[in-house]
Image (cartoon, rainbow, N blue to C red):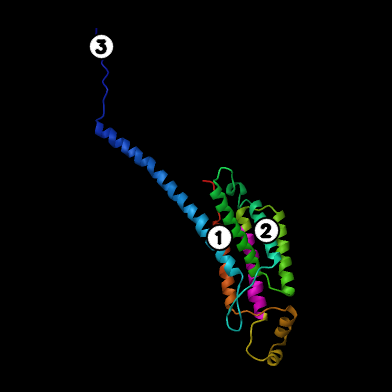
Amino acid sequence: MNREVEVIDVEPDGEIVAENHTRERALSVPEQSGAAASDQRTVLTYVVLPFAFLAVTLLGGLRLASADNAFIFIKPALICLVFASVLMLILVRSRLIEIGGWFCEEFSTLKNAANGAVLLTLFAASAQLFNSLLPEKGLPFWVVGFCFTWTLWNDLCAEFDAKRLLRSLGALFAMAFVTKYLVLANLTAPDSSGWLKRIFDNPAKEAFTWLLDLPQYSAGTGYIQFFAAIIYLLGLYLTPRTTQK
């Protein structure tokens, strides 16, 4: 009787070991890239963003005196804290920030505290940015403040996604910056001549200065607040929606 013999080819041990090493390397590459991406997100969230928002907090209240360019720090008005609170609600409502992704029972106490500190710096930067763009006193304070109130109220009731919200805030801050540091600042630009000569040379400008009751600052103030607004918007763009991995 004929028997069929099945022949099994066995690979040498060296080839099997080499194949196993290849598979191990292929599996380790995605793990290493994922770990590197996680480290970058951690540095961005807990180092870069707080530093940027704290810089905005410092620069937002900084002014330069018109006489000698001395540093003047202006504390935010109470309405700026209200605007910042409403803005934080808008950021949550538009899902630019998900509260469940920043505070969770699964997170450690240290991570929840760190996330709270990051959002606190965001709130402080928002308040100081409104302080930067809102005129200090007089009729412009009430006019620009009303515009902020009307815009934020509409944004709070409207349906926004993250990108549309960033564009809306960028347009709002740009218009406020132009109004304060280009239009109103030119109406009260400091002049070295005497007050009587200024009245004869430019009576309209002196009338606006008296009626609007605007303080005079050095031109460098506008440059400082411009960079403060840019840093804030950039930091807001880089803020992650959630800190869950």
Q: Decide: marks 2, 3 in contact (CB < 8 A)?
A: no
Q: CA distance from mark 2 to mark 1?
A: 18 Å
Is residue 240 in sight in this rendering? no
Crowd band around label 1 with a 10 angstrom C-alpha radius: few (<14), some (14–19), many (20+): many
What is the magenta range? 166-186
Q: Which residue is nearer to you in this view: 170 or 72?
A: 72
Magenta span contains residue 168: yes
Q: Which structural element holds mark 3?
A: loop
Residue drawn at the location 69% of the way across and 73% of the way down = 136
When the figure is inspected, residue 106 is found, relative to residue 187, above or below; the finding is above
Q: Quadrant of residue 4?
A: top left
Rounded to the nearest whole Å, what is the CA distance between mark 3 and mark 1? 78 Å
- Compared to residue 74, the image places residue 6 above or below, namely above
Asked if residue 113 is among those painted magenta in the image, a careful observer would answer: no
Q: Secondary structure at mark 2?
A: helix
Residue 3 disc label = 3
The Cα atoms of the two marked residues, 2 and 3, are separated by: 87 Å
Q: In the image, what residue occupies the spot 58% across and 83% down?
A: 68
* Mark carried by residue 46: none
Q: What kind of residue is marked 2?
A: Ser
Q: Look at mark 1 in the image and give the residue it sits on.
A: 235
